[in-house]
Image (tube, rainbow, N blue to C red):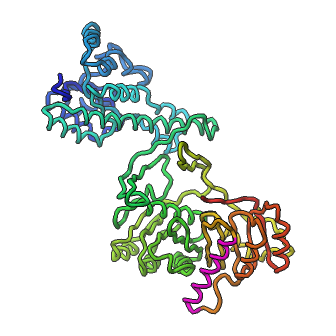
Amino acid sequence: MSDGDRVLVKRALFSVSDKTGLVEFASALAERGIALVASGGTARALADAGLEASDVSDLTGYPEMMDGRVKTLHPAVHGGILARRDLAAHREAMEANGIAPIDLVVVNLYPFERTVAGGADRDEAVEQIDIGGPALIRAAAKNHEFVVVATDPEDYEGIVRELAENDGGTTLDFRRCLAAAAYARTAAYDAAISQWFAREVDIPFPRHIAFGGTRAELLRYGENPHQEAALYRTLPERPGAASASAIQGKALSYNNLGDADAAFELVAEFDRPAIAIVKHANPCGAAVADTLAEAYARAFACDPVSAFGGVVAANRRIDEATARAITEIFVEVAIAPHIDEAARAIFAEKPNIRVLETGAMPDATAPGLAVRSVAGGLLVQDRDGGRTGEAALRAVTKRAPTEAEGRDLLFAFAVAKHVKSNAIVFARNGATVGIGAGQMSRVDSTRIAALKAADIAREAGQGEPGTTGSVAASDAFFPFADGLVAAAEAGATAVIQPGGSVRDEEVIAAADERGIAMVFTGRRHFRH
């Protein structure tokens, strides 16, 4: 029965795994005289709450069977959902076969994503692949001119309100919105299954690929105010900015989230207490030390000007001393696995600082996919989980690095992995002292890093820039000797780079001429 595009809801079908709000919602429908039909455990939950609901098996004439694999796949169910009420032939078919219309379909799917994220084995994961649920959802969404579909407990309140405002009916615009949400839900569900299956059979890049997520929040805007944006969360969750708990502060922006992610992934590289300060997707300082507060002071010293308004990440619980140091200037975000109570009190004195607690650190070496859009397509690659250890270093100069230089070389190379290419990082005693990022020429990145270090030393009244006696890391090989020469002129005593240039011998000779130790890693870390 309809009045214009308004369709009355007389009968609702329930089949839900997540029973959040189920009884309250079903009660609200029953109070309107809407007949309830439910399957299996959903029917039992409604009965336990004292609600009268027909079982799907009464509708189909068949019991639920095969451990619940077969229960709703039947013409009595799908015919009631898919029938077009405006076509005489459809109405006649329903009457001839004893099929009653279903006006509202309430389905949420087996928790496949959560099951897999929890480390379930293959058999358990397969059993959580829902078949009947997606079929019901897609059928209802297809026939949205006559049927309402709800796929999430968050839909319930809106449906109750819609029914109240339309005398027990729903409008076409409302049904279209829920149908769009329904198709997005089944698409994300299938994406999760397809990605899991591809991993199971070791096909990293299948012929067809799909990605899905759940919208966590709408953001104020994207990179710029004229761009709209939203944050979507994916499973399995990786500890970081997207899944963190907000302790305080304003809502996160698109750029806040990007910078917080970049900073947190950087500090995940290190076992020692580490701090990274990121501004516009590039680190402006990073350090490791015996304490987090010391690491912060040394990271901040690399570029105090750029640190203002930046994002600070820690790989340890932020304590009172560290929080006090962070709040000495304005920062946009502080992110860490844990924030202790004393630190929270310090941050609370600066309510504009967004403070995020992740609960854990991500595994820097864990496999995963990185996705980037290009016009007409997606670029998909493995996450850069490569880590360079001491055993991978190959000394190529007459002088090998000292033990102290070796430690700093590995630290600088790990930081360079998180700097936009072309990347040059100067480091000394476990802290960056100069960073050059995102230049078209590697020698320009080297000169910029050295120039900034010299400016900071001059402003601080220091006699020599921090690059004097430092080591230098390059994310890719030096195509010419000029970049290495620039690093030497800045005061670097040792250099780490992947190697592999046709002019490697020229670069090695330039290093030997200046008494510089140089090691090759055989591994490049471009970041665009």
The answer, for residue 43, to whether it is visible in the render is no
In the rendering, at what x and y percent does residue 426 appear?
66, 75
In the rendering, at what x and y percent does residue 242 appear?
44, 56
In the rendering, at what x and y percent does residue 462 appear?
60, 91
The answer, for residue 188, to whether it is visible in the render is yes
Question: Residue 469 occupies which quadrant of the picture?
Answer: bottom right
Farthest-out residue, top: 96
Judged left or right of residue 498, residue 416 is left
| 398 versus 157 height, above or below | below
Q: Which residue is drawn at 19% across and 25% down?
A: 10
Judged left or right of residue 96, residue 205 is right
Secondary structure mostly taken by the magenta-highlighted segment of the chain: helix
Q: Residue at x 61, y 59 (%)?
A: 527
**Magenta stretch: residue 447 in it?**
yes
Q: What stretch is highlighted in magenta?
A: 443-461
**Magenta stretch: residue 318 in it?**
no
Q: Which of 415 and 129 is in front in this view?
A: 415
Q: Which residue is drawn at 50% across and 69% down?
A: 279
Q: Nearer the viewer, residue 138 or 225?
A: 225
In the rendering, at what x and y percent does residue 328 appear?
42, 81
Judged left or right of residue 469, residue 112 is left
For the N terminus, the image quarter is top left
Question: Residue 483 occupies which quadrant of the picture?
Answer: bottom right
| 147 versus 314 height, above or below | above
